[in-house]
Amino acid sequence: MKAAGENQTDVKKLEKELKKAEKEAEKAKAAAADEYEITLNNVRKILFILYENKFTVCRRERDANSGWLTFRWQINMDGIDYQIEREKKKLYRNLIKRKEYEDSNVFYVCPQNCLRLVFDEATETDFICPICGEDLIFEDNELFKQLLDNRIAEFGEMPK
């Protein structure tokens, strides 16, 4: 059994090593932020988005002394093919809906880029922008519809 003085020495060594490890972790975070030009808050946002979509697993640990939470993240590859396929189908459906909306409406826009209105809404405002008072002008959305068509074609045959 160790004497009380030896235990204190071990505790001091451990504290010193922990402080050294914390400093090295901070340096690594700063280096990663500089190298990838990404902030710590953006990393957190990305991790939580991945967590919401079940691409990561998160375990929280609370420090008994400070009360701070530490999050331990792990990539979850289970079901990733299913998740990706689900997201592709969702994107495809949204593109189809947007294309149908663009095809079935005539649009008028404010020259000051305040807003974009469908014909019925534009008639309600007498073709005058309710924000700035400028006359609304017709918008030819053929280029946008072509871009939507091209994006939809990239999917090939997708079940709805």
Image (spheres, rainbow, N blue to C red):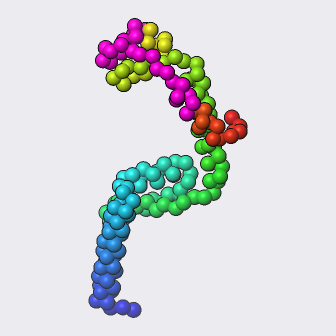
| Quadrant for the N terminus in the image | bottom left
Tell me if I can see residue 22 in this picture: no
Q: From the viewer's perspective, tell me whether residue 86 is left or right of residue 7.
A: right
Q: Residue at x 52, y 28 (%)?
A: 143
Residue 89 in which image quadrant: top right
**How many numbered markers are drawn?**
0
Residue 15 in which image quadrant: bottom left
Query: Residue 64 at x, y = what percent?
Result: 36, 65
Residue 149 in which image quadrant: top right
Residue 6 highlighted magenta (yes or no): no
Q: Residue at x 63, y 57 (%)?
A: 78
Residue 134 highlighted magenta (yes or no): yes
Q: From the viewer's perspective, tell me whether residue 145 is left or right of residue 155.
A: left
Tell me if I can see residue 32 in this picture: yes
Q: From the viewer's perspective, tell me whether residue 82 is left or right of residue 135.
A: right
Q: Residue at x 43, y 8 (%)?
A: 124
Q: Residue at x 58, y 22 (%)?
A: 103
Between 47 and 151, the one nearer to me in the picture: 151
Query: Residue 137 at x, y = what percent?
Result: 41, 16
Whether 73 is drawn above or below 141: the answer is below
| Quadrant for the C terminus in the image | top right
Between 105 and 19, the one nearer to me in the picture: 105
Between 126 and 20, the one nearer to me in the picture: 126
Query: Residue 148 at x, y = what percent?
Result: 57, 32
Query: Residue 130 at x, y = what percent?
Result: 34, 15
Q: Which residues are magenta?
A: 124-147
Between 61 and 55, the one nearer to me in the picture: 55
